[in-house]
Amino acid sequence: MFGGRFSLCQGLPTGSMLGSLYLLWLVAMTTSLVSKAQVLTPQDYEEDDDEAVATPSLAVPCDYDRCRHLQVPCRELQKAGPVACLCPGLSREDRQPDPPRLGEVHIVAEEGCAVVHWCAPFSPVKHYWLLLWESNGAPQKSGPLNATVRRAELKGLKPGGTYVLCVVAANDAGESHVPGADVEGPDNWTDPSFGPCRKLIMPPKPLTLVYAAMGVGTALALLSCAALVWHFCLRERCGCPRRHGTAQTSEAL
């Protein structure tokens, strides 16, 4: 008898007790799940809609044009808006920049100047400068230009002169490559015109319309005077046939 009671207390429960224990466990689990559950109200749905509207939209490309004069750096544009925009890919800052691309060159022959325009490379740039070859020897170098500058004016160009112009980009790692820098003189420069350099040929200084009109008028006046002088000289030298015939007629009468 003792062994049976001992085995009952220490052994597995009977079938009725198993059912009771399973029922208690099921009630406990159901109560726990109900206590953790949250009932959604119409206000909760409205809050979810507000959160969906407040979700930031996808980033868009920055309003950055590498050929625009006085263009703000793209990193500053990223900080200006509420959402960071996307900048074009750039090379590493510890590498020298790629060459810029020289664009339109507007020559003003009357004033002996040229307005040049270029586009920034896909590299970090700290400043620019211009190189100008007029003849054999070292080129003339302009002062440093801000990284936002894309346009500059060259003055003092001679009418009928030939030049080679290059734009150079620089950062802390170095400066961009200048093709044909070892060529002596602009006459021997044959590199393509869509890179950082270009050959410039200044036309002769044109005459204004006023000077041209004055020159033509003066020439016509001189020709008229010469024709009149020549005509009177011939009359003095050869005489006038009409007067001689009239004199003979009067004598006969």
Image (cartoon, helix red, strand yellow):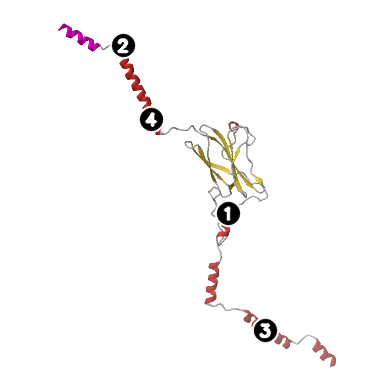
Characterize the local packing of mark 3: few (<14), some (14-19) or many (20 or more) Cα atoms within 10 angstroms.
few
Position of the N terminus, as image quadrant, is bottom right
Q: As shown in the figure, which amino acid type bears the numbered disc 2? A: Arg
**Is 117 on the left-hand or right-hand side of 29?**
left
Q: For mark 4, what is the residue?
A: 214
Callout 3 secondary element: helix
Q: Are marks 1 and 4 in contact (CB under 8 Å)?
A: no
Q: Are marks 1 and 2 in contact (CB under 8 Å)?
A: no
Q: Residue at x 53, y 70 (%)?
A: 50
Q: As shown in the figure, which amino acid type bears the numbered disc 1? A: Cys
Q: Are marks 2 and 4 in contact (CB under 8 Å)?
A: no
Q: Which residue sits furthest top?
A: 252
Q: Residue at x 80, y 89 (%)?
A: 9
Please provide percent x and percent y for residue 168.
61, 43
Instruction: Say if 48 sits above or below 207 in the image.
Output: below
Marks 3 and 1 sit apart, C-alpha to C-alpha, by 61 Å
Query: In front: 28, or 37?
Result: 37
Instruction: Say if 17 sits above or below 250 in the image.
Output: below
Task: Choose the circle earlier in sequence order: 2 or 3.
Answer: 3
Q: For mark 2, what is the residue?
A: 237
**Is 10 on the left-hand or right-hand side of 228?**
right
Q: For mark 1, what is the residue?
A: 74
Q: For mark 3, what is the residue?
A: 28
Task: Choose the circle earlier in sequence order: 4 or 3.
Answer: 3
Task: Choose the circle earlier in sequence order: 1 or 4.
Answer: 1
Marks 2 and 3 sit apart, C-alpha to C-alpha, by 148 Å
Position of the C terminus, as image quadrant, is top left
State the extent of the magenta-drawn residues as a range.
241-253
